Amino acid sequence: MNDPILVTRSSMPDFEEYCAEIRELWDTHWITNMGVKHKALQAALEEYLGVPHVTLYTNGHLALENVLAAMELPAGSEIITTPFTFASTTHAIVRGGFTPVFCDISDRDYTIDTKKLEALITDRTSAIVPVHVYGNLCDTEAISRIAQEHGLKVIYDAAHAFGVRRHGVSAACFGDASMFSFHATKVFNTIEGGAVCYPDDGLVQRLNDLKNFGIRGPEVCAYVGGNAKMSEFQAAMGLCNLRHIDRELAKRKLVTEHYRGRLSGVPGLRLCPEQEGVTPNYAYFPVVFDGYKYDRDQVFRRLAEENIGARKYFYPLTNSFSCYAGLPTAGAEKTPVARHISDRVLTLPLYADLAPDDVDRICDIVLER
Ligand SMILES: *Cc1c(COP(=O)(O)O)cnc(C)c1O
């Protein structure tokens, strides 16, 4: 039996590099609560992402919950989003007390279909939470235009889009704010972690309050906040990983090109087209089995038999989760394109150090006669 291939593998610096980075924490005993590593990572990310403000969080999900709270949207209002995403996006909306309204996705890049967006806007709509799925950028221009016309906030779920740029502008720069995840499985990780990126100076205080109990000083509690702070150990991991991000992305590019070389032009296999003017981050390699000789589940089982972990990402759609069965806006039939893709998509293993031989082994099984 060949060695197992997992769907992803966390990027990590050399052990010695991480040890050197955390050495001073043993001198100061300051290991969380916005210490030196936290400050250094925040500054480094503002620079790397080219955005005025970055607020760091202990994970991406709480970053999204907190930025939704920080926008001070009317209680119980409707937020338009897509169901072709990770549970977190929809859960953050619902846990914030809002109603998710599900818009269908584009058949081309699986991001929100802006042609179907306007019809879902009502006088209760307060915001749009689009997702840069697989690192494919949404049609940010159309979204801005619609949001402006209707007075809506735009908060991007950019969990997949670290390092992606369009005409040199990073994915952190669109809308009112963008949430990034630095989870172990993402392109850039801080073990667990996340961030909100935004241009508005007025949000800085509120986002800091929300992640630290609203405590502004030894005797001042100004806001009813929770706890979602990034620790010094997470930030130290981020500082190390950020040093190597360009090399990691270059390696992911090679893996992706190898996959494309083997799987492009095969009838019934659909790969994501590269987006015009966009520098991608090669976060995922989704394949849609549409009219192929095997269906998605057959390929999934064949890979599993060979110890290869592909992922049905995203299946099921969040609007068909059992926890949302009672929600009037739920139901996969309302988003037919998302349902079609979700039933047919598989993301193949992809990480910086995935060997060419392993890519061949995976492709041989997918293509097997
Ligand atoms: C990973 C992810 C999240 C949540 O981020 P965590 O850091 O795991 O909390 C949210 N949305 C999407 C699309 C994701 O892939």
Image (cartoon, rainbow, N blue to C red):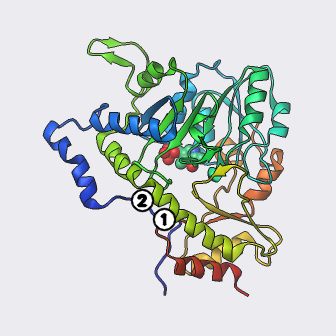
Disc nearer the start of the sequence (2/1): 2
Residue carrying label 1: 352
Task: Say above or below: 76 vs 12.
Answer: above
> Residue 110 bears which disc, if any?
none
The kind of residue tagged 2 is Ser
Q: Position of residue 88 (x, y in %)?
A: 57, 43
Q: Could one spot residue 328 in this view of the protein?
A: no
State which quadrant residue 40 falls in: top left
From the viewer's perspective, tell me whether residue 55 is left or right of residue 72. left
Q: Badges 2 and 1: C-beta atoms under 8 Å apart? A: yes
Disc 1, SS:
loop
In-front residue for pair 155/239: 239
The kind of residue tagged 1 is Ala
Task: Say above or below: 122 vs 91.
Answer: above
Q: Position of residue 137 (x, y in %)?
A: 67, 46
Q: Position of residue 227 (x, y in %)?
A: 39, 30
Residue lying at 64% horizontally and 75% vertically, measured from the top left: 301
Task: Say above or below: 335 vs 195.
Answer: below
In-front residue for pair 343/68: 68
Residue lying at 61% horizontally and 54% vertically, measured from the top left: 280
> Residue 11 bears which disc, if any?
2
